[in-house]
């Protein structure tokens, strides 16, 4: 596949008039209603909103996991909405990395094997030192031979991060990555995410409901009833950020 | 990497599949080892002859190799002359074998091999047998016999031959079985030659002799040495092997089917339980075909591991199988288990292949998992049944109906196997269509409880099954198989057991029958004593078949003037005429068992009629060429019934004859059915227990939720048991549903064939066992696993 990665665009992901309707007939639910939003390369965006606001749907559509009913989504200069499942599979494994709340790892594989899995699916050569470097990057160089059951929740999440980044994706999607973690391990994972954005210019889009988690982002996008409600740029490492975000959330939920 | 890691890590999920493969491969290995061990052996009476020259082989109407085409005495003489000229050959012995049976105190001495017990004296060299007392026979009324018979040289012995009993003087006794007459008597009794033995001189090279013999006999003969001499085996041994082979073939077929079925069911269940993990793989870039390959690869690994264990199981069980076959008298007398590599390798290859085939459905399901499923918590099924599954199910149902109809009209040799295939097809159909049926069935069964009860149980049971009809279908599948096999097989046996004797009795009404009693057939003197009624003498004839190959068919010699007025004609049944490609008026060169050719004109081609026969000639014509042929049964109008019959024959009325005739077959059929049912029910029960245990284990998080919602251990256990019973009931219902209609169809077909009214019969004991066995195993399995999962643990 010939692409011009990281080149001609400064917007890593661009949504244009995206609509997503679930169900049919009388029982339709509009999860996203003509959302247009761009995520610039090298930025860390948090997507927030009340339950049912469409934030997960937005992530799923942008990441090529789900198909929009209407509208265009550009990732790596290609329209994801127009792709079939096969093309989206290739797109995911070439250009996109994922971290979820839980169940991120294949239980039967070691940390290193989990990390090299996307390369194997893509039929690419697996370089042992790359894998170990990726694990070292997330602070788990010593644990490459351990299975998920032998790792803590935070460590599992960091292995998932290493795996998401092994293909050097254009964009990293994180769906409540700290949802199942306690406060201190949450902080580890979020700090890691922040460092990846700062050091490696890694475009990152994170869905969360936690104001503290969102405070690590550059920009917070608020959704309500499937529509863009607000967009707030944060000052870097400002201790007042969480309170600011929480207040905005409270306004939306009111 | 992923495949092996998954197998290592998720062994719990694969236990059921593994066990299914172990049992299946065990069954197949047992049958193959037994089959291999039962291959023809060199007859003891030919053991001392290093090389045998035998004539070319004819085929039957279906084209499979059958009898050797005998040489006439002139052909044999020419060949003998050429073989004698080979340097180093000391003896060239023309071997002959014909019916001979001793009568002691007016009773036949029982002998399975009686049809080929008579030989010429020179045949003793083939073993070789030697005299232990007395001398060789020198006159036509002298015979040398087995010392084991207990007669002394010089005494008289009554020997029954095809024309009746004769008194012979025992000239000597020898150390082997059989009756050895002078070579002249043997030539007269069995003029056709089916084997010539070559005995080398002491210092001659057998290899040189064999290659020269091959040159001397050109294309008209085959020279066999070593184990290949097993080609020449007595008909009765070949027949026993045929019956034994049928039995073990049915077992292997069943083993194959149940393995594919159980592997498919367990893997589909295992796959539904790991949709989330598969979704994760899809999310991080696995293509559907990669997921598919992973599932198939896992199955191959499980299959290979299971095959190794299965082969060991098969080896351990082979002696048991041998004991069963010997007990049923469907194995050669000197049958022992020998183990060679090919049966085990084949069983292992089949086992691995079968696991992969069984994983096909699971791999399809897995490859359709969408990435989003990795992110969803509750696994709720979306569609009740896929299009492909529905279509396949309906096709299987249709094919099953056709096969069931075929069962009613097929020949008796194939009836059991056709019934088996019909049962399999129906079971596949039921398993595929189960998700459609489970919903309505569960609603119906739980309706009375759900309306009245205020407890959580009925509500939970309904919701759990109705929301996971596919899971319920996977669990019910082995039950459908167990009940289906047990009911159909036992039902068919019972139904045929009542229908055939009744039909035969009706057909034979108003007649009495003279049947054999301790002899393989009736000799001519008994036929002559009873001049009224139908008496068919049975021989084999060789005719040019379709495609130029010499075809061997069974021919009957009739004394009915309707068929025997012209000794140079034959009457054929329509099917026979068609398969031989002959038309009325045509003249066909027919070779008889004496090796002679005679031109026979096809006088008529008539509709098929088993009572008349498919290839009928004048009795005199058959007798002229086959001096050792015997008569099967004499059918006499009741008014002409003789008051008594000679020894070696027995008089029956229609009913006892029909029952006795059927019972000979039925003994085998019943044992076969019993074995098949035991295997099917045991195997399926195992699968049910496994599936239940797997689903109980897979739902441990659900149980935690229910516990935290205030469910007591007792409530949870009774909920699980209620669900188990319900699923088993649905499986039982489906099993009955798919087997009863074909049984009714079979009965209807049999009514037509036999001309009596036949109703389907069921064996109550078998049916209850088939229902209660799996039910108990399922309840025990799900109860135990659930208890293990939810029991309170000390913190």
Image (cartoon, coloured by chain):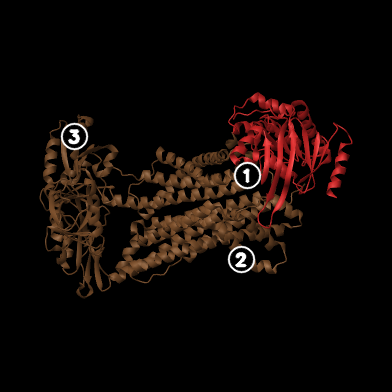
Chain colours: A red, B brown
Residue under mark 1: which chain is it in? B
Mark 1 closeness class: few <14, some 14–19, many ≥20 residues within 10 Å? many
Kindly indicate whether the residues beneath marks 2 and 3 are on one polypeptide chain. Answer: yes
Q: Is residue A159 left or right of residue B37?
A: right
Residue A101 image offset from top left, x and y in percent? 73, 41
Quarter assignment of residue B416: bottom left
Mark 2 closeness class: few <14, some 14–19, many ≥20 residues within 10 Å? some
Q: In the image, which disc is placed on residue B370? A: 1
Q: Name the residue nearer the viewer: A172 or A71.
A: A71
Q: Rounded to the nearest whole Å, what is the CA distance between mark 2 and mark 1? A: 34 Å
From the image, state whether disc 2 or disc 3 is nearer to you.
Answer: 2
Which quarter of the image is occupied by the N terminus of chain A?
top right
Quarter assignment of residue A191: top right
Kindly indicate whether the residues beneath marks 2 and 1 are on one polypeptide chain. Answer: yes
Q: Which residue is mark 2?
A: B445
Task: Decide: is B178 above or below B564.
Answer: above
Label whose residue precedes the other's in the sequence (3 or 1) = 3
Q: Rounded to the nearest whole Å, what is the CA distance between mark 2 and mark 3? A: 78 Å
From the image, state whether disc 2 or disc 1 is nearer to you.
Answer: 1
Residue B399 image offset from top left, x and y in percent? 43, 56
Label whose residue precedes the other's in the sequence (2 or 1) = 1
Secondary structure under badge 1? loop
Furthest toward the top, the residue is A129
Quarter assignment of residue B50: top left
Q: Which residue is mark 3?
A: B213
Secondary structure under badge 2? helix
Q: Is residue B790 visible?
A: no
Residue B630 image offset from top left, x and y in percent? 20, 58
Q: Name the residue nearer the viewer: A165 or B300.
A: A165
Q: Is residue B549 left or right of residue B732?
A: left
């Amino acid at each position: 596949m010939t692409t011009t990665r990281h080149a001609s665009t400064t917007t890593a992901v661009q949504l244009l008039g995206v609509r997503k309707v679930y169900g049919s007939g009388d029982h339709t639910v509009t999860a996203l209603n003509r959302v247009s939003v761009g995520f610039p390369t090298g930025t860390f965006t948090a997507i927030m909103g009340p339950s049912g606001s469409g934030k997960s749907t937005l992530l799923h559509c942008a990441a090529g996991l789900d198909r929009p009913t209407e509208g265009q989504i550009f990732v790596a200069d290609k329209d994801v909405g127009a792709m079939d499942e096969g093309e989206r599979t290739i797109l995911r494994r070439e250009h996109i990395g994922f971290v979820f709340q839980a169940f991120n790892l294949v239980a039967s594989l070691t940390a290193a094997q989990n990390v090299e899995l996307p390369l194997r699916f893509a039929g690419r050569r697996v370089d042992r030192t790359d894998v170990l470097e990726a694990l070292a990057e997330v602070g788990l160089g010593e644990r490459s031979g351990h299975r998920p059951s032998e790792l803590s929740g935070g460590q599992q999440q960091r292995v998932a991060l290493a795996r998401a980044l092994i293909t050097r994706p254009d964009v990293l999607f994180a769906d409540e990555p700290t949802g199942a973690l306690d406060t201190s391990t949450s902080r580890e994972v979020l700090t890691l995410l922040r460092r990846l954005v700062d050091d490696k210019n890694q475009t990152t889009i994170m869905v969360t409901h936690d104001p503290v988690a969102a405070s690590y982002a550059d920009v917070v996008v608020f959704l309500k009833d499937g529509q863009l409600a607000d967009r707030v740029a944060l000052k870097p490492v400002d201790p007042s950020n969480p309170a600011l975000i929480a207040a905005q959330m409270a306004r939306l939920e009111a | 990497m992923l495949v092996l890691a998954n197998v290592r890590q998720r062994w719990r999920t694969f236990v059921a599949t593994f066990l299914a493969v172990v049992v299946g491969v065990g069954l197949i290995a047992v049958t193959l080892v037994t089959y291999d061990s039962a291959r023809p052996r060199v007859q003891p009476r030919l053991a001392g002859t290093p090389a045998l020259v035998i004539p070319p082989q004819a085929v039957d109407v279906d084209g499979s190799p059958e009898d050797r085409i005998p040489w006439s005495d002139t052909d044999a003489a020419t060949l003998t002359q050429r073989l004698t000229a080979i340097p180093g050959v000391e003896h060239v012995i023309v071997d002959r074998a014909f019916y001979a049976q001793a009568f002691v105190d007016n009773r036949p001495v029982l002998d399975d091999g009686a049809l080929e017990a008579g030989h010429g004296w020179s045949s003793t060299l083939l073993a070789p047998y030697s005299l232990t007392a007395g001398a060789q026979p020198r006159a036509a009324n002298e015979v040398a016999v087995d010392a084991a018979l207990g007669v002394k040289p010089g005494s008289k012995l009554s020997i029954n031959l095809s024309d009746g009993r004769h008194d012979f003087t025992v000239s000597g006794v020898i150390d082997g079985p059989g009756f050895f007459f002078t070579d002249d008597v043997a030539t007269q009794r069995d003029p056709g030659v089916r084997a010539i033995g070559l005995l080398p001189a002491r210092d001659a090279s057998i290899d040189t002799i064999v290659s020269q013999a091959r040159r001397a006999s050109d294309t008209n003969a085959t020279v066999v040495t070593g184990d290949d001499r097993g080609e020449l085996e007595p008909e009765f041994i070949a027949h026993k092997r045929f019956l034994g082979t049928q039995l073990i073939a049915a077992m292997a077929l069943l083993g194959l089917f149940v393995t594919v079925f159980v592997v498919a069911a367990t893997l589909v269940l295992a796959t539904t339980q790991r949709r989330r993990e598969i979704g994760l793989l899809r999310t991080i870039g696995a293509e559907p075909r990669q997921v598919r390959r992973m599932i198939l690869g896992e199955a191959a690994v499980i299959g290979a591991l299971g095959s190794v264990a299965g082969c060991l199981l098969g080896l351990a069980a082979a002696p048991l199988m041998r004991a069963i076959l010997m007990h049923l008298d469907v194995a050669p007398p000197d049958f022992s288990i020998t183990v060679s590599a090919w049966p085990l390798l084949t069983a292992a290859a089949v086992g691995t292949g079968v696991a992969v085939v069984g994983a096909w459905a699971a791999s399809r399901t897995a490859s359709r998992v969408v990435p989003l499923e990795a992110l969803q918590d509750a696994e709720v099924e979306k569609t009740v049944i896929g299009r492909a599954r529905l279509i396949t199910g309906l096709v299987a149902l249709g094919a099953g109906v056709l096969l069931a109809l075929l069962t009613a009209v097929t020949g008796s040799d194939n009836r059991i196997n056709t019934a088996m295939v019909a049962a399999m097809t129906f079971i596949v159909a039921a398993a595929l269509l189960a998700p459609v049926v489970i919903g309505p069935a569960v609603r119906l069964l739980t309706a009375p409880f759900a309306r009245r009860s205020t407890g959580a149980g009925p509500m939970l049971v309904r919701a759990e099954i109705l929301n996971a009809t596919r899971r319920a279908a996977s669990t019910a599948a082995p039950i459908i198989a167990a009940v289906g096999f047990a009911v159909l097989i036992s039902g068919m046996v019972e139904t045929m057991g009542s229908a055939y004797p009744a039909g035969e009795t009706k057909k034979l009404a108003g007649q009495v029958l003279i049947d054999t009693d301790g002899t393989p057939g009736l000799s001519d003197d008994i036929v002559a004593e009873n001049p009224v009624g139908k008496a068919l003498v049975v021989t084999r004839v060789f005719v040019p078949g379709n495609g130029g190959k010499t075809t061997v068919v069974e021919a009957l010699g009739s004394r009915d003037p309707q068929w025997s007025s012209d000794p140079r004609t034959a009457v054929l049944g329509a099917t026979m005429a068609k398969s031989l490609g002959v038309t009325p008026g045509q003249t066909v060169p027919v070779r008889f068992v004496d090796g002679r050719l005679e031109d026979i004109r096809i006088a008529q081609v008539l509709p098929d009629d088993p009572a008349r026969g498919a290839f009928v000639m004048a009795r005199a014509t058959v007798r002229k060429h086959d001096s050792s042929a015997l008569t099967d049964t004499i059918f006499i109008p009741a008014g002409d019934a003789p008051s008594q019959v000679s020894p070696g024959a027995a008089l029956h009325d229609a009913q006892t004859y029909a029952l006795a005739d059927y019972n000979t077959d039925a003994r085998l059929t019943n044992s076969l059915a019993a074995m098949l049912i035991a295997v099917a029910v045991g195997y399926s029960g195992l699968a049910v227990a496994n599936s239940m245990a797997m689903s109980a284990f897979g739902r441990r998080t659900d149980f935690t939720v229910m516990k935290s919602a205030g469910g007591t251990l007792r409530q949870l256990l009774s909920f699980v048991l209620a669900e188990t019973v319900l699923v088993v009931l649905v499986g039982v219902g489906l099993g009955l549903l798919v087997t009863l209609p074909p049984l009714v169809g079979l009965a209807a077909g049999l009514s037509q064939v036999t001309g009596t009214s036949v109703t389907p019969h069921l064996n109550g004991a078998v049916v209850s066992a088939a229902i209660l066995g799996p039910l108990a195993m399922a309840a025990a399995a799900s109860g135990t696993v659930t208890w293990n999962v939810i029991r309170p643990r000390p913190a």
